[in-house]
């Protein structure tokens, strides 16, 4: 079980206690959501870079760019 430290500023006493079942459950959910959020962020960065490369290649070839490529090259 995960532990937490509680510090009482008035008394200066620090106590270590176990998480409650609810706190433990929330910790697990938060960790899972962090993994999802990081993957979403990484996917967005990868897509942005791919659009940038694709947009540059299309500009060089004189082809039309899609909105995502324009945004990646020139911003919104």
Image (cartoon, helix red, strand yellow):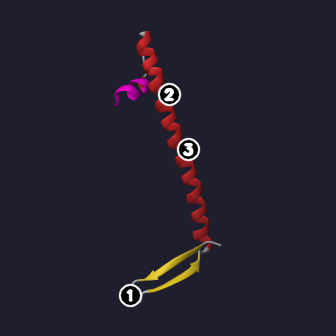
Q: CA distance from mark 3 to mark 1?
A: 42 Å
Q: Is residue 4 visible?
A: yes
Which disc number belongs to residue 50? 2
| Residue 61 shown left or right of residue 39 in the figure | left
At 39% from the left and 24% from the top, the residue drawn is: 70
Image location (x, y in percent) of residue 20: 60, 75
Name the residue at 47% across, 30% down.
49
Residue 57 on image: x %, y %: 46, 17
Residue at the image point whose x is 55% and y is 59% from the top:
30
**Residue 64 is at least partly visible in this image:** no
Q: Position of residue 61 (x, y in %)?
A: 44, 10
Q: Is residue 16 above or below residue 60?
A: below
Q: CA distance from mark 2 to mark 3?
A: 16 Å
Q: In the figure, is residue 68 to the left or right of 34?
A: left
Q: Are marks 2 and 1 in contact (CB under 8 Å)?
A: no
Q: Quadrant of residue 11?
A: bottom left
Residue picked out by circle 1: 10
Tag 2 secondary structure? helix
How many numbered discs, if any? 3
Instruction: Decide which of tag 2 and tag 3 comes sooner along the chain.
Output: 3
The residue positioned 57% from the left and 58% from the top of the image is 31
Quarter residue 75 falls in: top left
10 Å neighbourhood of mark 3: few (<14), some, or many (≥20)? few
SS at mark 3 in the image? helix
According to the image, label 3 marks what residue?
Answer: 39
Which residues make up the magenta segment? 68-76
- In primary-sequence order, the first of circles 2 and 1 is 1
Magenta-drawn stretch, dominant element (helix, strand or loop): helix
Q: Are marks 2 and 3 in contact (CB under 8 Å)?
A: no
């Amino acid at each position: 079980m995960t532990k937490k430290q509680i510090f009482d500023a008035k008394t200066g006493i620090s106590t270590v206690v176990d998480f409650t079942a609810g706190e433990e459950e929330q910790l697990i959910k938060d960790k899972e959501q962090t993994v999802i959020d990081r993957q979403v962020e990484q996917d967005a960065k990868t897509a942005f870079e791919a659009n940038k490369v694709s947009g540059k290649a299309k500009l060089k070839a004189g082809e039309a760019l899609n909105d995502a490529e324009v945004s990646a090259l020139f911003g919104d």
